[in-house]
Image (cartoon, grey):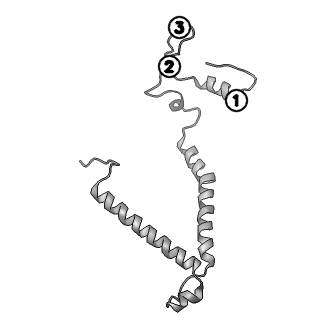
Amino acid sequence: MVESTPSPTPSRANNGFVLYLISNILFVVYLIWAFIPDPLLHYFGLTYLPLKYWAIAVPIYGLVSLFVFVMFFYPCINMLLVPPRESLNVLTDLYTLSDRKETAPGGVPSACDIPLSTVCEILYLRNKHVYV
């Protein structure tokens, strides 16, 4: 069985270096196409190129798509992955620490899970100041 690890291996290093070179070359070609005037590009024989409009439109469309994904789809996906509030998986699991041990006055309390009702009171009921 091959262990999957994020540590660098020679093949990952080679692939990363090639991707780095290709992305930099494509970026330089994009900048040349976007900033050099068309008559100069036609002089070098480059006549079949997209309109300069697309040099601005494609990045803007990409950023708008990213914004829509981040502001709408990503939260929706996260809400689909969260179990409903009534589910027992929200309240307890294998690692729940429900035993609250007594501490000395002024001491640091032991680590334990705060009940959901207490969390809701602290977060959503502004009139009650109940702290654990």
Distance (Cα) linking label 1 and label 2: 23 Å
* Residue depicted at 45% across the width and 68% down the height: 24
Residue 97 vs residue 9: left or right? Answer: right
Report which residue position mark 3 lands on.
104
Q: Residue furthest left?
A: 1
Dividing the picture into quadrants, the one containing residue 15 is bottom left
Considering only vertical position in the picture, is 59 above or below 71?
below
Distance (Cα) linking label 1 and label 3: 30 Å
Please identify, in this view, whether the residue under mark 3 or under mark 2 is nearer the observer.
3
Q: Position of residue 75 (x, y in %)?
A: 60, 48
Identify which amino acid the numbered label 1 is placed on. Answer: Tyr
Identify which amino acid the numbered label 3 is placed on. Answer: Ala
Query: Earlier along the polypeptide chain: callout 1 or callout 3?
Result: 3
Query: Earlier along the polypeptide chain: callout 3 or callout 2?
Result: 2
Q: Position of residue 44 (x, y in %)?
A: 50, 90
Report which residue position mark 2 lands on.
98
Considering only vertical position in the picture, is 77 above or below 29?
above
Considering only vertical position in the picture, is 98 above or below 67?
above
Distance (Cα) linking label 3 and label 2: 19 Å
Report which residue position mark 1 lands on.
124
Query: Earlier along the polypeptide chain: callout 1 or callout 2?
Result: 2
Considering only vertical position in the picture, is 60 above or below 7?
below
